[in-house]
Image (cartoon, rainbow, N blue to C red):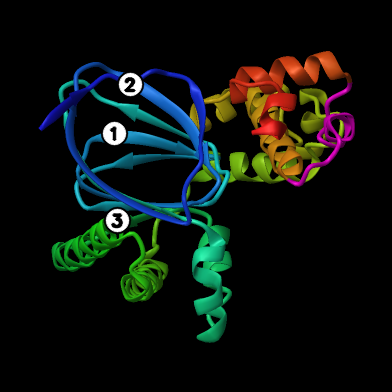
Amino acid sequence: MGVFILESEVQILKSKDFEIHYINIQACVNNQLIHYHDSYELAFFIKANLNIFIKDINYSINDGDMIFINEYDIHKIIYNQNIQYSRYVINFKKEFLMPVLEHLQMQSLLQVLSGKLNGKIILKISQKNEMIEMFNSLVKLNTKIESKGNGIEEKSLIKAWLIIILTKINELNLFLPNKKEVQVQKIIKYIDKNYANNLTLDKMQEVFNLSKFHISHIFKEITGFSVIEYIQYTRVIEAQKMLKESKDIIDVCFSCGFTNIPHFYRVFKKISKVTPYKFKKL
């Protein structure tokens, strides 16, 4: 079993079309990791005692829990000291599965999973053991691909196993949010829809008929982010998507809700660790 120390910073983790990892380690300090992916993430916790903030909900994670995270959803993982941490993590991009899903007339599966109010799945012991077998099969298949350098047959089997797993967790997703979480979900949806506009707490106070102090408090409590931080992360994520499409940096700046170029550069570099210009080149 390894030991690890985590740095608390925002990272974008770029994935291959499909990746799976298993780790069994121990956190030696209380710490947190804030990041987001350009892919879907499915985490299966064999042994864990931690918290994960995903967009608008704080999930308490224990042995046997699973989490489905949508692409580009910011999530903060808060680790407890000296706790054993054992889990599988799958990252996959939409284009990896979509041709097969369309052939099976199941193309709405990812959209349904992404649109759920929550991403946590609590497994019974029998379900947990079944999932362990399926995840182990995926690890073995992926190892074969890495050793062969190709593995067309193995890739097809991986897609089949992954679709089975996603179908099962879609049926098992039963977690219900509380009142505060529902309020924050509405605020998150409002930000996601209006990030390109001038967003202020005064405006949100009018829209939601809640005091801006209450909005700030519950937002921080549920997500771990301030409202301003979340707006900035949302704008930068959208800017990254546009820069990947080779759009003009100035157009991207104003299209994503920033009011001037210097501020856009400062916020983008703070979150992405590189300037918009370098991100576009990379």
Residue 262: x and y in percent read: 82, 13
What residue is shown with label 2? 6
Q: Position of residue 217 (x, y in %)?
A: 58, 23
Residue hosting label 3: 146
User: Please, is residue 179 above or below residue 126 in the view?
Assistant: above
Q: Earlier in the sequence, mark 2 or mark 3?
A: 2
**Residue 25, visible in the rendered structure:** yes
Disc 1, SS: strand
- Residue 50's disc number: 1
Eye-nearest disc, 2 or 1: 2
Q: Position of residue 7 (x, y in %)?
A: 38, 18
Look at 28% across and 18% down and name the residue there. 30
Mark closer to the chain start, 3 or 1: 1
Q: Characterize the local packing of mark 3: few (<14), some (14-19) or many (20 or more) Cα atoms within 10 angstroms.
A: few
Residue 105 visible (yes or no) = no
The residue positioned 70% from the left and 19% from the top of the image is: 267
Q: Nearer the viewer, mark 3 or mark 1?
A: 3
**Quarter location, residue 163:** bottom left
What residue is shown at x 31% (from left), y 71% (from top)?
154
Give how far apart the Cα atoms at labels 3 and 1 are.
Answer: 31 Å
Q: Is residue 142 left or right of residue 194?
A: left
Of pointers 2 and 1, the one earlier in the residue sequence: 2
| Image x and y of residue 23, in percent | 21, 41
Which of the pair 192/164 is nearer the observer?
A: 164
Residue with the most extreme bottom position: 104
**Range of magenta residues:** 245-259
Q: Is residue 203 above or below residue 21?
A: above
Q: Alpha-carbon neighbours of circle 1 within 10 Å: few (<14), some, or many (≥20)?
A: some
